Image: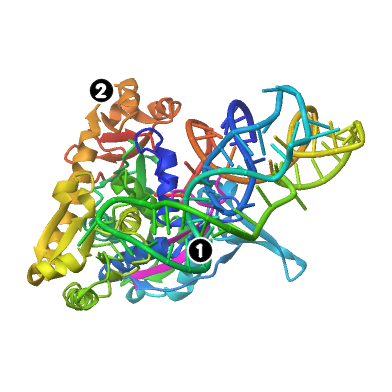
Amino acid sequence: MKLASQAEDFPRWYQDVIAKAELAENGPVRGTMVIRPYGYSLWEAMQSEVDARIKAAGAENAYFPLFIPQSYLEKEAEHVEGFSPELAVVTHGGGKQLEEPVIVRPTSETVINASFAKWVQGHRDLPLLVNQWANVVRWEMRPRIFLRTSEFLWQEGHTAHATQQQARDYAVKILYEVYQDFMEQVLAIPVYVGLKSKFEAFPGAIGSLCCEAMMLDGKALQMATSHELGQNFSRMFNITFLDQNSQEQHVWQTSWGCSTRMVGGLIMVHGDSNGLRVPPVLAPIQVVILIVREGEGVAACAEKLRQELAELLGGNRVRIDDNTDASFGRRSTDWELKGVPLRLELGPRDVAEGVGVLVRRDLAGDKAAAKVAVPLAELPTQIVSTLAQQQQDMLSQATSWRDSRTQEAATPSEAVEIAQTGFARIPWDVIAEQGEESIAAHAVTVRCLQREDGSLPESSDEPNLVALVARSY
RNA sequence: CGGGCUGUGGCGCAGUUUGGUCAGCGCACCUGCUUUGGGAGCAGGGGGUCGCCGGUUCAAAUCCGGCCAGCCCGACCA
């Protein structure tokens, strides 16, 4: 069965890839998803890379409860207003109606800050840098698998600092050193980093920073966010400390997250007519050694290569496919659907000639360039360098695409026009607050604000800012 | 939540206009043999109260009413 055409029916193509690459399927409750083993392995690879960066930024992992007292959410006015429409509320437990309903967390600012209030006493307790990997629930009107599901997996970081500047600096550090670096170096997805308009900011934040990526259908996807919360939560939850002068102060805070939505972004940035393409740095399986058919010395040769590669590449990211009951064509297309970066075809003919046929998934559109016969002795080093090359090529290909889909606009109506196919860059003064609603009528929104040189503004009131507007998921 | 489309074995569909001769096709699955360098072939086989509930009728996948679910476009939303 063929995939739907990416050009003719993008949403259908997206769902076909998810089904045929065995990434995920719908769960029994509307908006929920079952993440299948291969899809989950992609998520685990993302987790491990993001987690390493979070730890490098100094945060530690912890775990907080799934259930939150309703009263906690109500402490921060904007926060509760922003989230109430999409809350799942537990009213019964143990066969009895609960005295106070319990919220299934849509995000954990409130429970975590209740703990922070106990943990922070003096300035020596700061900064407090905590992260958790968890599931959250937001009852979405219009779910789309991976992009917006009622339950999704993510990490959420929560921090407390002694000064506003320290909090702000940390939110920026996370944005660049964790998120942007991960998106570009691991996912090979270029992102615009910027500040959300007040209209688009997180409920309860004084400023929201974000990474925005461009999908192959010309729609934007928010890949991660990092919020500056000011003292909004510390005042409500009484998170105070004694500073060096023995004065009681409220802490300054941040929160930041990225989710399983990134799997959707990966598909929509790198997918092609043959399925998914996974960048090598992320790939749970980087190389599949496909035994074309059994024969003299083929299995032994494959196993020897696998061991050499496992050592060179680290981890266990080389797979041997010796399922010769299935045809060569079937197995080739299946691995292509899953997006494994490199396939090494090995059969009796190759072994006799002392070569292996190396096939690059990222070039699958160009069969001649994609396949090359490499002497067995050179294969391990050649594979290592090819993987590195593929990673680079995928990032530059995605960057060219994104850049070609970013155009200047002078008026809101021009921006709406350009946003039909990508990002429009327009002076923020021209949009202003009321313009934001007028473009919203055309399903186009301000994705983020940047300075002219692409750097982060201090606030949306700064002069000469540029707004990046687009249709979005 | 509004508009449109669709619900028939795991997936994709035909059949509904004109009620009965209707439970069918392709893929997938199982068994055997032959195959294997780009989605294998032949033979045999298993699996579906036709989304759910009710109604009309001698008779409903098919007609009527209600409900539910999925998808797309919006509204909403990180």
Q: Amino acid at mark 1?
A: Phe
Q: Nearer the viewer, residue A156 or B14?
A: B14
The chain holding disc 1 is: A
Magenta-drawn stretch contains A133: yes
Task: Tell me the quarter of the image containing the C terminus of chain A.
Answer: top left
Say whether residue A175 is left or right of residue A141: left
Q: Which residues are magenta?
A: A126-154
What is the secondary structure assignment of the residue under circle 2?
loop
Residue A259 lies, in percent from the top left, at 40, 57
Residue type, mark 2 in image: Ala
Query: What is the CA distance from the residue labelled 1 to the residue labelled 2?
Result: 45 Å
Q: Give the labeled residue for mark 1.
A: A237
State whether residue A205 is above or below residue A55: above
Which quarter of the picture shows residue A283?
A: bottom left
| Disc 2 crowd, CA 10 A, few/some/many (<14, 14-19, 20+) | few
Of the pair A367 and A180, the residue shown nearer to us: A367
Tell which circle, 1 or 2, labels the residue nearer the N-terminal end. 1
Residue A20, labelled with which disc? none
Q: Is residue A13 left or right of residue A135?
A: left
Residue A67 shows up from this direction: yes
Q: Which residue is mark 2?
A: A410
The crowding category of the residue bearing disc 1, from other C-alpha atoms within 10 Å (few below 14, some 14 to 19, many at least 20), is many
